[in-house]
Amino acid sequence: MNTTKTIVLMVGLTVLLVFLGGAFGGRQGMIFAFIFALGMNMFSYWFSDKIVLRMYNAREATEAEAPMLWSVTHDLALKMNMPMPKVYIIPSEAPNAFATGRNPNHAAVAATEGILRLLTREELEGVMAHELGHVRNRDILIGTIAAAIAGAISMLANIAQWSMIFGGFGGRRDEDEGTGGMIAGIAMIIIAPIAAALIQMAISRSREYEADATGARICGNPLWLANALRKLHAGSQRVPLDANPATAHMFIVNPLRGGGLVNLFSTHPPLEDRIARLESMVYGRAVR
């Protein structure tokens, strides 16, 4: 279901790009914006593991330094028929974790010192199964493509904005349409990037649900992950992580605080929904 939703959202994002390309920059403008945005995001995709690990001062851990984290990751990699990813520790008491790497052969998992002190072995297994689920499901590639399309849409809107300022937007057609065409153009310049961002965030949330389901099946007990999410949410409220908003989507629980309209742009689904879905895998119905 989440995979189907992701496909529908990706198609919607692509259609939005094609439509705006024709309206704002024509075919050439659309192609240029997409290639430029794709190039920037592919660089991020290729080097994301090194960039984000360095950003959080993560250090690679040996089996002797982090025996529980290392053995849990090793056992899950064997169970999932994946190469053993590199294991990193983030020097922070805020409980959280993420996975990175462009494919299973270049993957890494990172956990904070706080999460290792907070969770039981079973709960940590649920968390690491979720993170390896992201790697196996190629979520980093999906996120990169979505970001490239959304970035191209924002770039087209910026081109249209500057074109309007200098009187070139729409050419003869806007002169014929008059004020109505100008208002429509301004509306699209404002609405298009917002719509693209909303779709991009919806894709991210659908991949979180899918990683939860994958992790629950792999570790064998969905309640391990559900219990871990409860603890992580409470722990992150007590000790928030000093996270860069650009990398917030990578963590298993959202390190950023917000509510109301901010939730529309959240990269994570509501925690209550995630827990209810996991519990329904055990009890056969959503538990609230």
Image (spheres, helix red, strand yellow):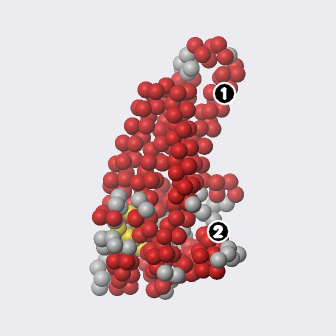
Question: Residue 68 location, x and y as percent?
Answer: 38, 85
Q: Residue at x 56, y 20 (%)?
A: 170
Instruction: Judge the density around disc 2: few (<14), some (14-19), many (≥20) Cα neighbours within 10 Å.
Output: some
- Say which quadrant the N terminus sits in: bottom right
| Inter-mark Cα distance, 2 to 1 | 38 Å
Residue 184, placed above or below residue 232 = above
Q: Image quarter for residue 231? A: bottom right
Q: Image quarter for residue 228? A: bottom right
Mark positioned earlier in the residue sequence (2 or 1): 1
Q: Residue at x 37, y 51 (%)?
A: 44
Q: Nearer the viewer, residue 185 or 207?
A: 207
Question: Residue 78 location, x and y as percent?
Answer: 34, 77
Tag 1 secondary structure = helix
Question: Residue 51 location, x and y as percent?
Answer: 35, 58
Question: Residue 121 location, x and y as percent?
Answer: 45, 86
Q: Amino acid at mark 2?
A: Asp
Instruction: Judge the density around disc 1: few (<14), some (14-19), many (≥20) Cα neighbours within 10 Å.
Output: few
The residue wearing badge 1 is 184
Q: Is residue 259 left or right of residue 156?
A: right
Is residue 63 visible to the viewer in this orientation of the structure?
yes
Residue 273 circle label: 2
- Say which quadrant the C terminus sits in: bottom right
